[in-house]
Structure formats: C-alpha cells, structure tokens
C-alpha cells in the first residue's frame, strides 16, 4: 500500500486502489498477507469518499487467512464506521476463475498446509506463473507446463539441505525451473536473511525484484536492459 501511494501519488493511487478486482494469496504465513487488512481498509475509505458501493474485491486465500481478516475487519468497521467491500473465496485447483478477461488457475504446492501457486493467463494469451513458497518437487512445473513470465521464490542462494527441510528453493533450481517452463523472463524474490546475491548478467532475462518495480508488457524489455546495465 505504501509503495503504491509513494510511487503514484495520492490521486493515481486512489484510482488504482478503487479499481482492484482481485487479491490472490499463496498461503497463510504472515509475510505473505501482512498489510492485507490495511489495503482493504484503504479500499473501503476510498469507496466511501466517492460514494461507491459496487466495487467488491475478490479475495482468494485459505480459510485461516479468511478467519483472521474477518476478525480484524469487524473491529475496523465498528471503530471507523466503514463498510469493507470484499468477498473471500477458497482457492480451488479444480476450478480456474476468470476476472475481467484474466484467468487464474491455482496449483497445489509442497510448502505448508493449503499452500498453492498460480498461473495467470491474460487476454493476449501471455501466461504469468507465480510459485509462492514451495519445494521444487515438480507439482508446480507439471501444473504450469509453460509460461512467458515466472515470478519465483529464491530463498537460498546455494543448494542446501534446508530446501527440503523448510520446503523452499535455491538459485540453481529456480534457474532450471525457468528453463523447463520456457519462461522468457524470470523475477526472483523472497530471499532468506543469509542470501548471497550473485551476478545474473549472464542471463539478461532474469532479475532480482526490488521495491517500486512496475512493469507493463510494453516496457518489460527496456526495464530488463536498464537493470542489467547497472553495475552495483
């Protein structure tokens, strides 16, 4: 929420927040839904400001997150005299959902109870796959099969026994996943505290994500060129 407001300013950020259609969350570990209530609260404030009642966010998550959010929302609605505009749904691997011409497929993964990944197919046919947190045991790869863009957790910089112990991935397995899925671009994220960042310039289509990163299909090539031209 803060990055949206800082990057786009008050007016544009209100427009963005007002028009959020869907939030999809991979699993119930706190670092993956921290800030969700604040975002829903801001959404409620913006809709109240403009007297809008027909903009509901579809929230796809597990029942644990739904329960936590509902408890907090009750307090906000009571204390702030606001109505939150969202509807929670269980992610279902058997039932893709379509929102505004975009299809979201949920794929079970090995990480924690009810953890999932997803693949998003846009109206132009491009496919974006997101791993969430997971052990690379082929569930994700077999479910996605192919994607154009890959957003992948990269918790460990080197192969380690911890990948299987905590159900995460390392740099080498992520690069192999990109190759296996035929992804044109790779965005690496979710780095462990001891992560040793390495030079990725040999692969100009892979980057470590960073704050305020914003891409469109028209600018993605230029952004990757700029990132790889920077010498740290």
Image: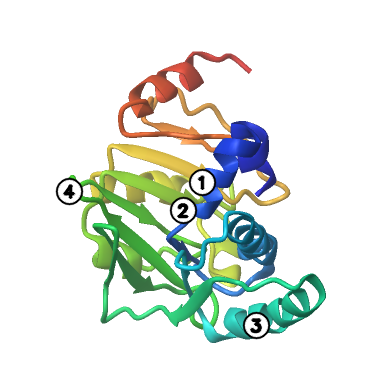
Q: Earlier in the sequence, mark 2 or mark 3?
A: 2
Q: Residue at x 61, y 42 (%)?
A: 4
CB-based contact (under 8 Å), mark 1 and mark 3: no
The residue labelled by disc 1 is 16
Cα distance, mark 2 to mark 3? 21 Å
The answer to whether 92 is drawn above or below residue 171 in the figure is below
Give the number of the disc on residue 70. Answer: 3
Q: Taking 143 as reference, is 133 left or right?
A: right
Residue at (29% x, 58% y) in the render: 100
Of discs 1 and 3, which sits in the foreground?
A: 1
Q: Position of residue 71 (x, y in %)?
A: 71, 84
Q: Is residue 82 left or right of residue 94?
A: right
Instruction: Characterize the local packing of mark 3: few (<14), some (14-19) or many (20 or more) Cα atoms within 10 angstroms.
Output: few
Query: In which quarter of the view is residue 201 placed?
Result: top left
Find the distance from the CA under tag 1 to the CA under tag 3.
23 Å
- In this view, the mark in front (4 or 2): 2
CA–CA distance in space, label 2 to label 1: 5 Å
Which quarter of the rendered picture does the C terminus lie within?
top right
For mark 4, what is the residue? 125
- Under circle 1, the secondary element is helix
Q: Are marks 2 and 1 in contact (CB under 8 Å)?
A: yes
**Label disc, if present, on residue 19 of the rendered structure:** 2
Rounded to the nearest angstrom, the CA distance separating label 4 from label 2 is 23 Å
């Amino acid at each position: 929420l803060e990055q949206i407001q800082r990057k786009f300013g008050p007016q544009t950020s209100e427009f963005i927040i007002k028009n959020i259609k869907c939030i999809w969350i991979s699993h119930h570990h706190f670092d993956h839904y921290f800030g969700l209530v604040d975002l829903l609260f801001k959404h409620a404030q913006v809709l109240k400001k403009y007297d809008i009642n027909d903009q509901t966010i579809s929230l796809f998550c597990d029942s644990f997150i739904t329960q936590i959010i509902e408890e907090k929302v009750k307090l906000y609605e009571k204390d702030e005299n606001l109505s939150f505009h969202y509807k929670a749904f269980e992610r279902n691997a058997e039932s893709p959902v379509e929102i505004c011409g975009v299809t979201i497929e949920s794929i079970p993964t090995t990480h924690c109870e009810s953890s999932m990944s997803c693949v998003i197919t846009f109206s132009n046919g491009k496919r974006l796959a997101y791993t969430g947190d997971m052990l690379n045991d082929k569930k994700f790869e077999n479910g996605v099969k192919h994607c154009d863009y890959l957003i992948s957790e990269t918790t460990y910089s080197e192969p380690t026994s911890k990948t299987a112990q905590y159900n995460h991935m390392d740099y080498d397995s992520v690069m192999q996943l990109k190759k296996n899925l035929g992804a044109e671009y790779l965005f690496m994220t979710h780095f462990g505290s001891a992560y040793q960042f390495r030079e990725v310039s040999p692969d100009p289509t892979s980057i470590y994500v960073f704050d305020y990163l914003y891409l469109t299909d028209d600018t993605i090539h230029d952004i990757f060129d700029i990132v790889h031209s920077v010498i740290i």
